[in-house]
Image: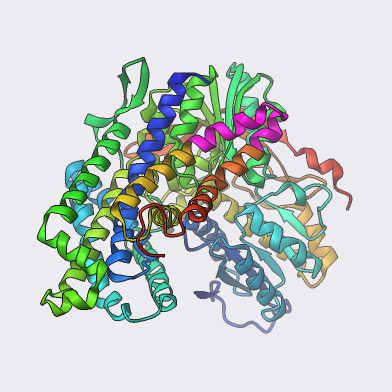
Amino acid sequence: MSTLLLIEQILNGLQFGVMLFLMSAGLTLIFGVMGLINLAHGSLYMVGAFAAAAVAGATGSFLLALITALAAAATAGALVEIVVIRRLYRATHLDQVLATFALILIFSEGTRWVFGSFPLFLDIPDALSGPVSLPGGIKYPLYRLALIGIGILVALGLWWLTARTRLGIQIRAGENDREMIAALGVDISRLYTIVFALGAALAGLAGALVGAIQSVQIGMGEPVLILAFVVIVIGGIGSIKGAFVGALLVGLTDTLGGIFLPELFKLFMETDAATQTGSALASMAVYILMSLVLIWRPTGLFGARA
Amino acid sequence: MKQLMLAAAVGALSAASVMADTKIGMITTLSGGGAGLGIDVRDGFMLAIEQSGRSDIEVVIEDDQRKPDIAVQLADKMIQSEKVDVMTGIIWSNLAMAVVPAAVNQNVFYLSPNAGPSALAGKGCHPNYFNVAWQNDNLHEGAGAFANTAGYGNSFILAPNYPAGKDALTGYKRMFEGDIAGEIFTQLGQTDYAAEIAQIRASGADSVFFFLPGGMGISFLKQYADSGVDLPVVGPAFSFDQGILQAVGDAALGVVNTSQWNKDIDNPTNAAFVESFGAKYGRLPSLYASQGFDTANLLLSALDKAAPSDADAFRDALRAAEFDSTRGDFAFGPNQHPIQTIYAREVVREGDVLTNKIIGVALENHSDVYAADCKM
């Protein structure tokens, strides 16, 4: 196992991590501010990817596709909040899970109705395609480097938004005490719609960015959603900083675990058996990480409440 | 989501008709990520039923959502309350394993239009179970044989960590005579292959074999093309079927894949199938559609000779397989799985559509290794 391969895998883990961060940031904001478990977050990721694929297919512009993805996911998010979610804030978590699960089915079948059952095509823009040579002779896809860059920019933007703006103050206040900020005259239902649309837009952005290197198909959001929940549990529910650290931890664990666990088992097992055991254990690695974090800190790394 | 389709109510009720109506139960995947495959099988199957013009065949179609538990429930309902005579439609091997053994033991005939798990081809074979597609290993064995003729000496191989993935790597290794530079089991449903591609780059292989059906294959090929690794790739047709090629895009161009069917196989049945499928559904058929079409035609050929209620005669009629297949000559081996030619195809662009073109034969009149274990 060479150093070059190790560095490349760390970059892969980081890239996976920052994309998970885009998903989990919205999820953790929505849970933190409104106390809502939104299973349909993965559907918003899918909406972003499909909107991007449709626009890129029609216009050929990736930038336009990204903007549309953001707008489509934010609009879908705002609509869902106003039509459905608004009625669920006072409901139990079980009702929320049930209603947002229904939304997953509605989004999936609605997307099939509009776009058909076959996966759509969305490609990397020409300017970002192909590998670049990094110092040390590593060849790494430029697009993935761009994803890392965009993810870090979004993280900085979110930090600025929550720490330095009026909206951010309201969001943080909303996390602490909903009744009090409503009493102080903040339009709480408007705030909720904005936060929900913001979270949805981030998911849509992630869907569009990742859609270019993966397959744009129905149900693409659910596997990511599961990992995003793992991320916010590790990071601490409601904490953007926690989501960032958690996402990087999960991204690195998943990527490096998949590589090194089979190698580790090969030291003392037959190749075939080592590959199978290692792969099986690697797919559990993030959940083992989650359990360890929860044993050590039951509220997650940066969580204020359980 | 229940669809009850009464096939082609053409002729009026005829007093001369002595044959009882035949009821077919189709359980296939019509929603969720794998829906494209089920829809193609269904459309190919229904096209053949419609073309037969028979009004005495009723097809009950249900969606299994790619979930074994739902497939089992649907099968129970079809056998016990709908009283179907013949079942078909299942796409995925894990669902087939959950449904088929129980169904055939209740004296229902099962014709598989897709899944061909090894467990049902060897010791677990059954007189009422017919596979019209392939045994799971077949196309992978074809890929291994092609790799030999292409002169590859050192392959990196990968597949998802589930039974069909293991069958795939076993099938490739059974035929491939070169060395294995590395072997990876990925997670089922994995969407990011950066880590695996990095390992391929570092492995010193001269070729890559992969079995990643559906969306997994789309992701892998796009990422592989963008990574700058330019080793030749070979795989079974499942990542290069008509339904997903457009989503892979130019990244798939020139890739060799193995299949028992392609739209340019030269026989009148196939030409008519491709033409009428396009006319009816407005798209090119995939190998899954051809399998659905062949399954229905096999069934129709047997129904011409005997009713399923006369189980022995109906079984013999199925075994004889006297129908015009889109693959040309069609025959069953002793375990009632096809003996057939596996072709090597190359992905080409025709106008604005990506599609496949046959470039040679990978394995001629190929059976499977499990047939020897089948005692019927």
Viewer-closest of B353 and A15: A15
In magenta segment, residue B89? no
Asked whether, in this view, residue B261 is left or right of residue B334, the answer is left
Asked whether, in this view, residue B335 is left or right of residue A37, the answer is right
Percent across and percent down for residue B224 are 42, 30
- Span highlighted in magenta in the image: A256-276
Percent across and percent down for residue B80 are 72, 79
Q: Is residue A137 visible?
A: yes
Q: Is residue B232 visible?
A: no
- Magenta residues: mostly which secondary structure? helix
Q: Name the residue located 36 percent from the left edge and 21 percent from the top edge.
A: A139
Asked whether, in this view, residue A99 is left or right of residue B328, the answer is left
Above or below — where is A86 with respect to A10? below
Viewer-closest of A33 and B343: A33
Viewer-closest of B296 and A113: A113
Q: Name the residue located 17 percent from the left edge and 74 percent from the top edge.
A: A181
Q: Quadrant of residue B279?
A: bottom left
Q: Name the residue located 37 percent from the left edge and 34 percent from the top edge.
A: B349
Above or below — where is B195 with respect to B329? above
Percent across and percent down for residue B292 are 58, 55
Q: Name the residue located 55 percent from the left edge and 19 percent from the top edge.
A: B205
